[in-house]
Image (spheres, helix red, strand yellow):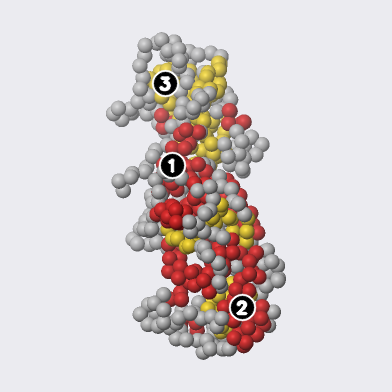
Amino acid sequence: MSEFKNFIEDIIDSDLASGKVTQVCTRFPPEPNGYLHIGHAKSLCINFGIKNKYNGKCNLRFDDTNPSKEDQEYVESIKRDITWLGFTWDKLLFASDYFDVMFDCAVKLINKGLAYVSDESADEIRERRGTLTEPGVESPYRNRSVSENLQLFYQMRNGVYPDGSKVLRAKIDMASPNLNMRDPVIYRVLHATHHNTGDKWCIYPMYDFAHPIEDAHEGITHSICTLEFEDHRPLYDWVVRECEFPQPRPQQIEFARLNITNTIMSKRYLKKLVDEGKVMGWDDPRMPTLSGLRRRGYPAAALRDFCERIGVSKANSEVQESYLQSCVRDELNRTANRVMAVFDPLPVTITNYNGSEQLSVENNPNADNVTYRNVTFSNRIYIDRADFALVPPPKYHRLKPDGYVRLKGAYILHCDDVALNDDGTVKQLICSIVPNSKSGEDTSGVKVKGVIQWVNAADCIDITVRKLQSLLTDVQDGVTDFNLRFNANSLQVVTAKAEPSLLSAQVEDKFQFMRVGYYVLDRDSADGNLVFNEIVNLKDGFNPAI
């Protein structure tokens, strides 16, 4: 966590100073109806960051109150993602662990005359809710007796009624200026098998009723959530108060959610992409899910750094996608080894060099301890076609006819001749090396400005590279609908020639392909057929002035 305090930490400091709280306890409460995405990373960093800063506790609690949309697959994926991001929870809990407690709380409210069973449909409840300027209309079932409500509620639990036929509503105030306080539904009938409780229950609590009970029961001191729950806070406080949980009761605090330009932050739409087969799954490297970003090669440390840099505020805003990429680039610049790869190979024959030799090339000049690897050099190499120009533009520092360039870690190369195809394109280069120009031992006196990557034709390997773009096209003519912005060209597969040192790489190993970008070895690699995902290019496109 940053040394600079945010408004949440100011509240916590005040609560600790006053004695209201003696140990801070937060929670991360995802619903297991999909995979976590980059937006959840901010909440994770806040909740677990507070735990670490204040030597407190943070629980992982699955909000599994809607069995029709939840699955054990999502539970396991969330646990993996949180661990990968570098956080450790104190208790692993489920909302379903508290179903008996929630049922007892509902009975308590009925006995206090603060809840009633309604036969209204969802549409009828919505129609009678009122508007921001007009009060709601009381339910015709609002004044049922306590005994009748208890009987009906127990019958709901016992499976007497079909789905949607009855609900339990809190009895608060149909004229409240806050629509969330106008007799909200707190239980509904739902005959569905639950991933954790099986068929024990056929009624399930609503989120606004379940969540405060869970927090209070666990002793959560600060219930940190996103800004859209600000209007729900009065109901949160009402539930913990009327269910008579002891002091100190949890305090709900809202912060602005994370929004990133050109990035899908809707779990529902991400699931749609998976279900329709438009992506390779939840961990497709184009997906903004944490598992997708991991597969793409985004380091967990870079995501934590990004969340710390953007900070915590009460004002909604949108962060540039390039800012996240800049954080990734900064981390990889320190940690990723360099290798040489050629995406558009141009053959080069060196006429004044025979045999081969092992050259020593540094792995990462920015590492704390710089190490080296050996690459083989011979008289037949490949350079990238983009590094040669028959008719070079002004100030061109790469190879050209009768020009010079430095081969990374090797020699200065001179272009003696150019062999052309029938259509006038370059077929191969005939070159020579400048005597005594070996890197680290250069006494040739020849000065060159350009340095390019290369691979040895005799032992280079072919690799498959996935070039990745956003799943969304840019907003044009005001079109923001994700369905109309799906980028059908977000994945392009190309081949390249690379150093054979990559054959020893392990899945999730990250590299800088020199002068190209950062890449990660994908799990689809097998039997020497290496598949790399593009992480981010070398050019930092983040402009803090925008």
Looking at the rendered structure, the kind of residue marked 1 is: Cys
Image quarter for residue 187? bottom right
CA–CA distance in space, label 3 to label 2: 80 Å
The residue under the point 45% across, 65% down is 229
Q: CA distance from mark 1 to mark 2?
A: 51 Å
Q: Is residue 291 visible?
A: no
- Closer-to-camera residue (137/451): 137
For the residue marked with disc 3, what is the amino acid? Arg
Q: Secondary structure at mark 3?
A: strand
The mark that comes first in sequence, 1 or 2, is 2
Q: Nearer the viewer, mark 1 or mark 3?
A: 1
Which one is nearer the viewer's eye here, 490 or 174?
174
* Residue 96 on image: x %, y %: 64, 65
Comparing 92 with 9, the one in front is 9
Residue found at the very far left of the displayed protein: 394
Quick one: label 1 or label 3, which is nearer the N terminus? Answer: 1
Q: Residue at x 63, y 66 (%)?
A: 98
Which quarter of the picture shows residue 28?
Answer: bottom right
Does label 3 or label 2 sit earlier along the sequence?
2
Which residue, given by chain and number where applicable, does mark 1 sit on? Answer: 327
* Circle 3 residue: 406
Is disc 1 in contact with disc 2, using a CB cutoff of under 8 Å? Answer: no
- Give the residue number, with chain letter if any, for mark 2: 107
Q: Position of residue 236 (x, y in %)?
A: 49, 69
Q: Is label 3 or label 2 in front?
A: 2
